Image (cartoon, coloured by chain):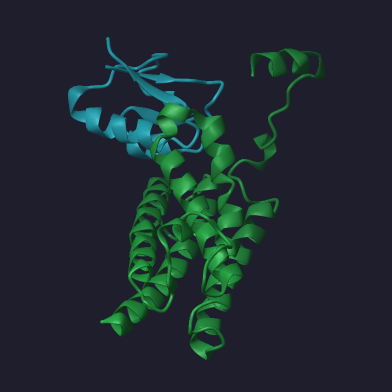
Amino acid sequence: MSDALWYFARGSGVISLVLLTVVVALGIGSRSGKPAFGLPRFAVSLLHRNAALLSVVFVAGHVISLLFDPYAQLRLFDVVLPFVGNYRPVWQGFGTLAFDLLVAIVVTSLLRHRLGARTWRVVHWLAYLCWPVALMHGLGTGSDNGTWWLWTISIACAVAVVAAIGWRLSTGFSRFPARAERQVAPRLRKELEEVR
Amino acid sequence: MKLHVDWTACDGRGVCTELLEEMLVEDDWGFPVARDGQRSPAVPPPLEGAAKQAVDRCPMLALKLIAR
């Protein structure tokens, strides 16, 4: 039984990484304002959300199975408090940190209409921190670190995210590059700050 | 029900014009324009579900449904 928990934790962790990679790529795709990955814009947006919610399910399974795993010795507060674990505390801590960030990003997204776009966006940018932290957690901890297949999956995920970020930073990214920058007249800037 | 666009927030990402094709078209810069020319176009009852989805999916939170 304890072996089953350990296998489940490893598998769900890898699936979570793959799903989160898809979520990041789709999130960048939806930001472009263009149909991306052969999908219309609303589909990119919905798939981004649904893949994110599915990744939460797998991350929850990953964490819960480790809570009952006798080897990982995960205590309840290890789920939220990073870097104090019994088993490879630094690498496990990255997992806890990524989990905290993921929860913050998902909860603010679900409450987006109440929080307002500005607060939501600031928290959503943490995805760019959450994803690499989750990747490092996967590479550093667990019994699969150093296996060829985990390296292959991790490198493929990293390539996908780096390519998406490269696309994000390229000049042809947004649909109307000519109107990409919203300029505020210098004489109005002070008033704008006051309004905000 | 009427659809209200907050033009200070709208960035013309084009999600609403896909979800509410019957009501909205894109202008040359990708911003939504009501087909009936109204500032806050009325949402016909069969399109209320689609309008709610458009409000939910707007990445800039620029859409709002207002009760008449």
Image point 42% across, 14% down: which residue?
B39
- In the rendering, what colour is chain B? cyan
Looking at the rendering, which quadrant does residue A195 occupy? top right
Rendering coords of residue A95 (x, y %): 52, 64
Looking at the rendering, which quadrant does residue A72 occupy? bottom left
Query: Horizontally, is B24 left or right of B31 in the view?
Result: left
Looking at the rendering, which quadrant does residue A189 occupy? top right
Query: Horizontally, is A106 left or right of A97 in the view?
Result: left
> Which quadrant of the rendered structure holds the C terminus of chain B?
top left
Q: Residue furthest top?
A: B68
Image point 59% across, 46% down: which residue?
A125
- In the rendering, what colour is chain A? green
Return the residue nearer the eye: B48 or A72.
A72
Relative height, residue B25 to residue A99 (above, below): above
Q: Residue furthest left?
A: B46
Q: Residue furthest right?
A: A186
> Which quadrant of the rendered structure holds the N terminus of chain B?
top left
Rendering coords of residue B19 (x, y %): 34, 38
Rendering coords of residue A108 (x, y %): 45, 39
Note whether residue A95 is visible. yes
Relative height, residue A53 to residue A86 (above, below): above
